[in-house]
Image (tube, grey):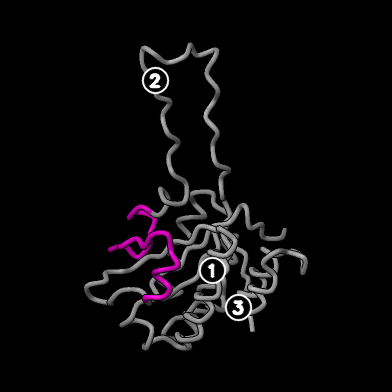
């Protein structure tokens, strides 16, 4: 099944200043994360960041942080216990009313935003924070696509073992270009030229 921009959200895990230099090809993972975040902004796909213990590991790359709607500070390795699920699937607002409200049979039902259940996730360290976050999101019944070329670990074998485990748990393994071209679907898309510039 192709990735649909209208059903997508982007989660970028822990691209932090003190962590990136220690990672195998961390700079390449960050470049692809920036491409994803810029494309998400262009297409109005919600993008969220996370930071693991920023007092110890520093904050996320500044440019990347600006492209995210919010950056969630966390202490757990998985971002889900620290509030990521609520960002991705906010609770539905309770219907309000007072004595002057219209009778129920005359009220229009609230228009709810469509649920964006496909989560594109990438980040560092792949075998720890990204893995645990993605597995928790699978448990929460999100559809998970791991953007492999925007992920990094200190040791390549750890990263690859995480990919194997995630694929076994039902996550799709994709690349940055797969995501961007599937969001576009056609060279006639109004943002095709801007997206092509991101890829080149």
Mark 3 Cα shell of 10 Å, populated few (<14), some (14-19), many (≥20): some
Mark 1 or mark 3, which is nearer the start of the sequence?
A: 1
**Quadrant of the frame with the C terminus:** bottom right
The stretch drawn in magenta includes residue 73: yes
What residue did someone put label 2 on? 97
Image coordinates of residue 87 in percent, x first then y, are 42, 51
Left or right of residue 187, residue 151 in this image: left
Residue that protrudes farthest toward the left in the picture: 55
Per the rendering, the mark at residue 52 is: none
- Cβ–Cβ under 8 Å for marks 1 and 2: no
Mark 1 Cα shell of 10 Å, populated few (<14), some (14-19), many (≥20): some
Mark 3 or mark 2, which is nearer the start of the sequence?
A: 2
The stretch drawn in magenta includes residue 186: no
Give whichever of 146, 59 is nearer the camera.
Answer: 59
Give the vertical position of 20 relative to 84 (above or below): below
Q: CA distance from mark 2 to mark 3?
A: 47 Å
What residue did someone put label 3 on? 198
Query: Which residues fall within the magenta stretch?
Result: 62-83
Tell me the element at label 2: loop
Tell me the element at label 1: helix
Residue 14 picture quarter: bottom left
What residue did someone put label 1 on? 165
Residue at 27% x, 71% y is 54
Left or right of residue 194, residue 89 in this image: left
Image coordinates of residue 153 in percent, x first then y, are 44, 81
Q: CA distance from mark 3 to mark 1?
A: 30 Å
């Amino acid at each position: 099944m192709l990735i649909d921009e209208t059903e997508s959200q982007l989660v970028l895990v822990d691209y932090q200043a003190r962590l990136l230099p220690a990672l195998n090809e961390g700079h390449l993972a960050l470049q692809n994360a920036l491409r994803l975040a810029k494309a998400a902004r262009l297409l109005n796909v919600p993008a969220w960041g996370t930071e693991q213990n920023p007092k110890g590991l520093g904050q996320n790359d500044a440019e990347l942080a600006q492209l995210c709607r919010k950056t969630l500070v966390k202490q757990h390795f998985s971002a889900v216990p620290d509030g990521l699920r609520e960002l991705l699937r906010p609770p539905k607002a309770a219907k309000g009313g007072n004595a002057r409200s219209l009778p129920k049979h005359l009220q229009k039902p609230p228009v709810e935003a469509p649920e964006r259940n496909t989560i594109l996730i990438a980040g560092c360290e792949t075998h720890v924070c990204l893995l645990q976050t993605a597995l928790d999101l699978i448990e929460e019944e999100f559809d998970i696509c791991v953007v492999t070329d925007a992920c990094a670990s200190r040791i390549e074998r750890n990263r690859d073992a995480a990919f194997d485990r995630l694929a076994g748990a039902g996550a799709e393994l994709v690349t940055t270009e797969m995501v961007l071209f599937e969001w576009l679907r056609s060279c006639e898309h109004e943002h095709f030229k801007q997206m092509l510039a991101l890829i080149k």
